[in-house]
Image: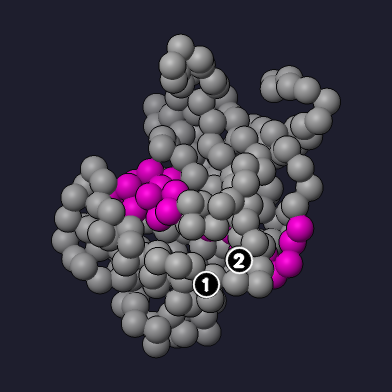
Amino acid sequence: MIKRGSTTNIKKFSEVFFEELYEPSKEKPVFIIGITGIGGVGRITVEIIKELTDAQLLCRVYSPYFPDQVQIEDGVYELLHYEIHHAKTGGRDVFLLSGDFQPDFTVSESSYTVAEGIVDYIVNLGCRRILVVDGFMNSKDIAVTSNDLDILSKLIKAGAKPYRGYLSGLAGLILGLSALREDVICVGVLAGCRNVKGDKAASLRALKFIDNVLGLDLNI
């Protein structure tokens, strides 16, 4: 599907294609995911982490289940894609997946297929710790969910509330499908927000909580 120069490595999981630019180090890896959702919390949080850590572009993610568009800036176009950045901070390798769109909702299997491909890539990378960032409405709290009760208890002791309700879209499916994999611990961190289009204050609350629990040594 994707043809670039010989310096890139194309990996396919399900119907998702990963154009990997280099082989990263993998010391105590954690994979943080921020796709556009309520308040843009996930995407904004990951973008800030990228800036604070000077993260490098590791991979572009393509799929026929993405919207049928190209993105154009200053007359130059690119096929619509997610990006995975890589940074070393707090004594560990941090992988950051970001995107400002959801898979095509008019195709029923699109979100499942993309989520499955992303989880496959993460597991193949050798990472067993996944953190998904999103938002929820009408609160200033930090709420958490996890498939590991011990981890969930520690997050609650760190000041978060246990989340109740639904988490839709790619964020929710990555949490759900990750729980089906052996030895994979997945955490959802949700920041309460008031601005559905872009709540930077909520994103900063999520960021500070993540920095605290992961010890990323971010200069916030």
| Quarter of the figure that contains the C terminus | bottom left
Find out whether the residues at labels 1 and 2 contact each other: C-beta distance under 8 Å.
yes
Q: Amino acid at mark 2?
A: Thr
Give me the C-alpha separation between circle 1 and circle 2: 7 Å
- From the image, tell me which residue sits under label 1: 217
Instruction: Give the magenta-colored segment's residue range.
Output: 25-48
Q: Is residue 41 magenta?
A: yes
Quadrant of res 14:
top right
Pointer 2 residue: 89
Residue 34 visible (yes or no):
no
Q: Which SS class for mark 2?
A: strand
Q: Residue 139: where, in percent of width, then height? A: 19, 66
Q: Is 133 within the magenta?
A: no
The image's colour scheme reads one colour
Work out whether mark 1 precedes mark 2 in sequence or the reverse, and give the earlier one.
2
Foreground residue among 79 and 169: 79
Q: In which quadrant is the N terminus drawn?
A: top right
Examine the rendered structure and indicate whether residue 72 appears above or below residue 121.
above
At 45% from the left and 77% from the top, the residue drawn is 212
Residue type beneath disc 1? Asp
**Which of the pair 190/74 is nearer the observer?**
74
For label 1, count other residues whose C-alpha is less than 10 Å away and answer few (under 14), some (14-19) or many (20+). Answer: few
The residue lying at 39 percent from left, 72 percent from top is: 209
Q: Horizontal and vertical percent for residue 202?
A: 27, 60
Please tell me which residue is depicted at 33% across the width and 70% down the height of the picture: 143
Q: Residues within 10 Å of mark 2 (few under 14, many from 20)?
A: some
